[in-house]
């Protein structure tokens, strides 16, 4: 036994004894289940095979859904990497997380992640590649925190296309498993960097064996042409790469006899990196794929769940099955609620009637407005409707034109939309992706999932709008959202963790050479 294993064992014995002294007696002899949390970087619902998507092949995700549960209404509260992941880790909505509501932020010391709580109570915790990011998380002594455990990135691979991460995710998972004690429960974060941009243009066609006609529908807010279809197939190619490592991880657990007692969660952090989706607050921005498999813990494998599930529900679920009651987990009070009733149910469809809505919102994502301020939004999705309130309608929702609309990743699709607007051939695409928006937006996401028809100003929907607005603002007040108390500008005053991002707008307007890799030079409007 090496020193790390000895210390891990000792910590497990001490902390577990303390934990079980406060837990109910049924937990005292129960074996605590493992957790494998798999998160793609920028993938929208419904781009997995289990949802009927024919042009993205995902046998790993499909297996988890088939042998576990497939969720049809899972949402992140905030459709951007760092704040979405912060919600997962803390069980709280982003507007409850101070600096962590923003992108490229300093993660507040006061908020403990569920990984940190599990590690303090006998779990072997680690991750590969992308954990919580981008930003900085330090303890009181200035040391980096392990928000998702210890990093495992030793093993590399020759990726199948340019810009795909060379980390061998599945091999690093094996390294993680080899480094734990035999009787030690584990929690592992598989943080793929796909399908985040950039892409090798044409990889889906040339290396994925795909055809332009495979794409069965191009969303109405983009032009339908060969360039956009090629871009979509490259996105599909990278999702499939994420899934191939998932298949290998499931096989590893099966070979080691640990799959049956491992909670396997497969999802994504936010919607696809295309205009009007990632970084925005529409249906395909926040609605994400989710499948959960747990052979020893799910009562009715193969069911489809229609309950509304938020990413803030993951932390309480994992702590619940780890035997860590809220009073003992060392975290700030959780807003999310455990999925345990769904796991234990033999029903398909709606399981818990009170799971009838989710809240969404955002603050400052990326830069490029005067003062580098954000674009604050809050919203509620309930039943068939999405209600959105935009607080600062004079601001550009995806960033200013002269600084490249920086809250939209550079891509062939983005370039097509900008060129179509400059040439006056199709300005409607630009308006939908980058144009200014009214204070209130209301959509029927069943009939209009692309959110093209704003119902907010139609008299026949005034009752639905006012009811949703009242519920949204009431719950936000209960959750102490600064926006509800006239203090919303605090989010714009929080510092960027990336020094190069400070005062970007002013520096750019002075003529300094400042640019970012996630946009193209042609994105900057004159």
Image (cartoon, rainbow, N blue to C red):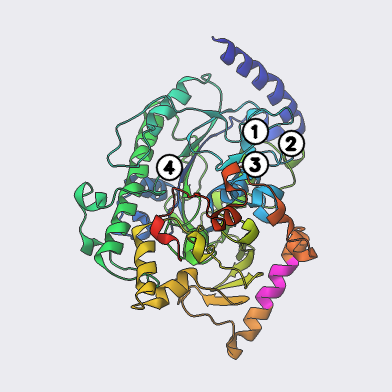
**Looking at the rendered structure, which numbered label has been put on residue 330?**
2
Q: Earlier in the sequence, mark 1 or mark 3?
A: 1
- Whole-angstrom CA distance, mark 1 to mark 3, is 15 Å
Point out residue 367 in the picture as x, y percentages from the top left corner: 57, 55
SS for dot 3: helix
160 relative to 71, above or below: above
Q: Earlier in the sequence, mark 2 or mark 4?
A: 4
* Residue highlighted by disc 4: 193
Determine the residue located farthest toward the front in the rendered image.
511
Closer to the eye: label 1 or 3: 1
Point out residue 237 in the picture as x, y percentages from the top left corner: 30, 49
Does residue 90 appear left or right of residue 415 in this picture?
Answer: right
* Residue highlighted by disc 1: 116
**Looking at the rendered structure, which numbered label has been put on residue 320?**
3
Confirm or deny contact between disc 3 and disc 2 (CB under 8 A): no
Confirm or deny contact between disc 1 and disc 2 (CB under 8 A): yes
């Amino acid at each position: 036994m090496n020193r790390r294993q000895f210390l891990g064992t000792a910590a497990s014995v001490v902390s577990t004894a303390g934990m079980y002294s406060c837990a109910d007696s049924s937990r005292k002899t129960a074996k605590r289940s493992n957790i494998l949390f798999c998160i793609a970087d920028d993938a929208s619902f419904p781009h997995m095979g289990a949802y009927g998507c024919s042009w993205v092949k995902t046998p790993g995700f499909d297996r988890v859904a088939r042998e576990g549960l497939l969720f049809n209404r899972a949402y992140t509260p905030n459709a951007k990497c760092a704040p979405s992941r912060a919600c997962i880790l803390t069980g709280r909505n982003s507007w409850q997380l101070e600096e962590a509501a923003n992108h490229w932020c300093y993660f507040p010391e006061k908020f403990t992640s569920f990984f940190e709580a599990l590690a303090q109570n006998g779990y072997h915790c680690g991750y590969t590649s992308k954990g919580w990011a981008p930003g900085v998380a330090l303890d009181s002594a200035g040391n980096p925190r392990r928000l998702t455990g210890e990093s495992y990135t030793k093993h590399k691979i020759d990726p199948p296309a340019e810009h795909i991460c060379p980390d061998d995710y599945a091999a690093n998972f094996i390294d993680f498993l080899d480094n734990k004690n035999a009787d030690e429960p584990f929690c592992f974060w598989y943080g793929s960097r796909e399908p985040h941009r950039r892409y090798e243009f044409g990889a889906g066609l040339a290396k994925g064996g795909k055809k332009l006609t495979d794409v069965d529908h191009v969303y109405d807010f983009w032009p339908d042409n060969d360039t956009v279809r090629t871009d979509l197939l490259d996105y599909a190619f990278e999702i499939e790469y994420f899934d191939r490592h998932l298949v290998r991880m499931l096989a590893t657990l099966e070979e080691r006899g640990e799959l049956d007692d491992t909670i396997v969660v497969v999802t994504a952090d936010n919607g696809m990196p295309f205009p009007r989706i990632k970084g925005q607050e529409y249906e395909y921005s926040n609605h994400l794929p989710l499948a959960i498999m747990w052979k020893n813990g799910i009562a009715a494998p193969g069911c489809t769940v229609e309950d509304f599930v938020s990413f803030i529900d993951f932390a309480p679920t994992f702590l619940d099955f780890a035997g860590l009651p809220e009073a003992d987990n060392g975290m700030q009070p959780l807003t999310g609620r455990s999925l345990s009733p769904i796991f234990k149910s033999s029903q398909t469809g709606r399981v818990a009637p009170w799971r009838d809505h989710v809240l969404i919102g955002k603050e400052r994502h990326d830069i490029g407005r005067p003062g580098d301020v954000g674009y604050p939004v809050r919203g509620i999705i309930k039943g068939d409707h999405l209600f959105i309130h935009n607080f600062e309608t004079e601001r550009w929702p995806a960033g200013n034109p002269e600084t490249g609309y920086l809250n939209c990743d550079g891509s062939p699709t983005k370039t097509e939309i900008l060129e179509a607007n400059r040439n006056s051939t199709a300005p409607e695409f630009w308006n939908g992706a980058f144009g200014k928006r009214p204070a209130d937006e209301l959509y029927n996401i069943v009939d209009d999932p692309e959110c093209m028809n704003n119902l907010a100003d139609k008299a026949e929907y005034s009752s639905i709008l006012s009811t949703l607005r009242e519920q949204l603002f009431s719950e936000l007040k209960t959750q102490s959202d600064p926006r509800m108390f006239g203090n919303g500008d605090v989010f714009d005053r929080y510092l960027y963790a990336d020094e190069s991002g400070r005062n970007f707008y002013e520096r750019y307007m002075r003529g300094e050479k400042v640019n970012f890799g996630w946009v193209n030079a042609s994105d900057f409007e004159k």
